[in-house]
Every structure is written in structure tokens, then in C-alpha cells.
Image (spheres, helix red, strand yellow):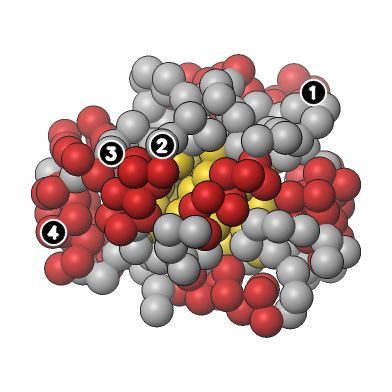
Amino acid sequence: MSSSAQAILTARTQNRAALVGYLPVGYPDVAGSFDALRAITEGSDGTGVDLVEIGAPYSDPVMDGLAIQHAATRALERGVRTADVFRAVEAVTATGTPAVVMTYWNLVEHYGVERYARDLASAGGSGLITPDLTPDDAEPWIAASEQHDLDRIFLIAPSSTDERIALTTRACRGWVYATAVMGVTGARQQTSSAAPDLVARIRAQSDLPVGVGLGVSNGDQAAEIGAYADAVIVGSALVKELIDNERTGSSDLSGLRAVVDDLAAGVRRAR
């Protein structure tokens, strides 16, 4: 069993959902992003996220909302490179928290699929979330991930047919990413009413753990989703804390840690 799947299943044994936290590499700069990634593994009291989703900045982030687009643009302007992604994986896994990378597929193809898989595994990474890669076009990645024992985390949307859900879950390795809403990422005032039904449809096709993302912004929403999902995925709410720091010229991560505390408390009261 992969370390990312194990993190989710360990949370399940505690009668709760796992908390997955996303931050991009290179924002506010490379060193600052490493500090932020380590901070979300800790929170304020050592109770941080269960799994880290490390974002690889991309010039055309079609699925990402304004907060993540802002952070990715700044990271690229400041010279972030794919090698920094692997260094970020090493920084996170050194804390004892497993890490997966979220990346648009063009970055992997440009780097070389087998080479990317090799270097990710060497850094201690658990696998990839690939939002714009479907199983139909994933043969090279499926082969490379099998060779290097890496997770394949494909996305399933509320619009997916049962046939598409079956095909996608068969191709996944580790766990499944259910997108709770149609559209781009971003914290929302309310969680998606379509998410519980989507999780149920996925579970009818697969025994893999199901993580739900897109829209979670606070502990109450994390508790709501954690009542039926195996993992609660949070990104924009964390990134916004770093954007606030950039606007004020601060490097204080106490606000970021406080958001993690609230989310971690939320998943722990979900059931």
C-alpha cells in the first residue's frame, strides 16, 4: 500500500477523514514555499495535515482559481523549476508526512515521463494527481508509475457517467480524487450538494479511498465533507494566507497554521 493511501486509511481507523493540504512550490519564493509546506504538516500544535499535495506551477492552469493562479504566476516569474518540486517533496517527507504532486501533464511530458517518475520516487513522493490527464491517454504514465511504485490519482467530476467512473477508478492507484463542483478551484461559502452522490457513485464502482476537493475553506465545511468522504482536500484557503502575507510583507506563518488547526479540528469532529 502506498504511503498516501495509508495516510487516508490510518485516518479512517480513527473514525475520521484525512486532511489533505495543497500548496504550490515557489510561492512566495522557493525557500518560503518549503517553510509553508512544513508548516501545514504541523499546524500550531503538531496536528497538521495527513497528506500534502504539492503543486507544480504551470503557465496555463485551466482548472485553478484566482488564488492558485496568482501564486503559480508569481512562482514562475521568480524562476521555480521542476527540480524544486522534487526538493519540496524531500522537505515534506522529511517531516514524516507523505506527499503527492499535483501537476499538469505537459510538465511531465516535457521532463520525460519515466525520468519524472524515477526522480519523484527517489525524492520520496507517493504519486501524482493529474487533473488534465485521462486514463485513455495515460499509458506511458501507467507504465512508469507501475515501474516506480507510484500512485495514479485521476479526477472524477459530477458530470462523469457510471461507465467513465468505472474506467477511471480501474486506472487509479492509491485513491480517487472527486471534484465536488464543476469549474475551477477556489474556496466557497457552501460545499457542493453534488458531492455526496458522486462519492456514493464512485464507491459503487471501487473500494479505493475517495478524496473530495474544490471549495473547502473552513473547519465546518471540512466536517461536513468528512462525514462521507475518506479525505478532505483544501488548497485555495491555504494559498490565500500566503497571498495575505505577500500583501503585508510578512513572513509570519501563524495565520496559515491557524487555518490548518481549524480544518484539522473539523475532520476530527466529522463523524
Element under label 1?
helix
Q: Position of residue 159 (x, y in %)?
A: 48, 30
Tell me: 87 left or right of 31. Answer: left
Name the mark on residue 248. Answer: 1
Q: Amino acid at mark 2?
A: Thr
Tell me: residue 174, above or below residue 103: below
In this rendering, the label closer to the viewer, 2 or 1: 2
Q: Amino acid at mark 4?
A: Ala
- For label 3, count other residues whose C-alpha is less than 10 Å away and answer few (under 14), some (14-19) or many (20+): some
Comes first in the chain, label 3 or label 2: 3
Comes first in the chain, label 4 or label 2: 4
Quadrant housing residue 14: bottom right
- For label 4, count other residues whose C-alpha is less than 10 Å away and answer few (under 14), some (14-19) or many (20+): some
| Depth check, front residue: 1 or 246 | 1
Q: Who's the residue at 82% across and 27% down the image?
A: 189
Q: Position of residue 219 (x, y in %)?
A: 84, 49
Return the residue at label 2.
161
Comes first in the chain, label 2 or label 1: 2
Q: Who's the residue at 19% across and 55% down the image?
A: 142
Q: Position of residue 204 (x, y in %)?
A: 49, 59
Return the residue at label 3.
134
In this rendering, the label closer to the viewer, 3 or 4: 3
Return the residue at label 4.
143
Dot 3 and dot 1 residues touching (CB under 8 Å): no
